[in-house]
Amino acid sequence: ERGGGGGGEPRWFAEDPRRAWGYWGRRLRQDQALVGSPSGLRLHRAVLEWTAEAPLGGFALSADTGGFWGAAGWSPDRLVEYSGSCVCLQCSVPCGSETWPLPGGLDFDLDEGSRRALGEIPVCARCHSAARPAVQMQGQDWAFCKQRRASQAARYYAWLRGLSARADADSLRLVLLELGESSPSVREELLSVMRRFPGARRICVNVEAPAQRSPSRTAEEEDDHSLSGFSGSASGSERTSCDRGLTFLIEPLEAIPRLEAELR
């Protein structure tokens, strides 16, 4: 379990907030280490540069909760985070639907023995209950505040409706980049866009083979199926067919020059 030591379920913010923040504090620090590494966001930034050259712009649809697209410079108005973001907080009760940015640094330490947070943990400014990451967590997460995600989705669907309303909608050359193994929700949305725009093309990078899935996958991810165009494993064919597109079964950073060539 990423973060280690359990405590990732929403119930822990009511039962033992320090255990909950022990888990999420470790996870946040892992994410921050990736953001700070030289190559951590290289692919995210490359996609941002390509999108800047696209006449109609683009959107990032992400099931990851690390806030990596925002950290790479992606506009919050062009981003949909299906599972929320660890770099935003909300009330754990919740007493309202508001979310707010994670402070610049975590003000508490992590005890390696008990895997609990030490010191002052984040709290809700309104009711003073423990704050929590604005992420849809495993288990029955009724407390997840969905308003931020709903606002992101509204902007995305407004952009799609604008494209559909164009006289040349059927010939628009949309490019859908699928990076890594998408969640079922993101993948279904990509397939929906393919059906909606006949000129759309899908390019998949480093899609994970079913046999290689991590044992820590969530139940939703375990119910997922590989792409209809996916065959073999990461050590197999470098390039396979993929529903009006291509699949590169190579490391994401190695894919950057090939992706750029395909987009050109």
Image: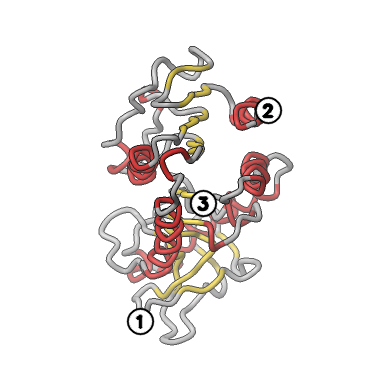
Q: CA distance from mark 2 to mark 1?
A: 48 Å
Residue 32 seen = yes
- Residue at 47% x, 46% y is 2
In the displayed structure, 74 sits above or below 254; it is below
Of callouts 3 and 2, which one flags the residue occurring earlier in the amino acid sequence? 3
Secondary structure of the residue carrying tag 1 is loop
Extreme-top residue of the structure: 236
Crowding around mark 2 (Cα neighbors within 10 Å: few <14, some 14 to 19, many 20+) is: few
Crowding around mark 3 (Cα neighbors within 10 Å: few <14, some 14 to 19, many 20+) is: some
Q: CA distance from mark 3 to mark 2?
A: 21 Å
* Quadrant hosting residue 111: bottom right
Residue with the mark numbered 3? 59
Of callouts 1 and 3, which one flags the residue occurring earlier in the amino acid sequence? 3
- Residue at 41% x, 80% y is 129
Residue with the mark numbered 2? 257
Residue 143, x across and y down, in percent: 32, 69
Residue with the mark numbered 1? 95
Q: From the image, which quarter does the N terminus lie in?
A: top left
* Quadrant hosting residue 47: top right
Q: Nearer the viewer, residue 115 or 260?
A: 260
Tell whether label 2 touches label 3 (CB within 8 Å).
Answer: no
In the displayed structure, 82 sits above or below 250; it is below
Q: Nearer the viewer, residue 68 or 141?
A: 68
Q: CA distance from mark 1 to mark 3?
A: 31 Å
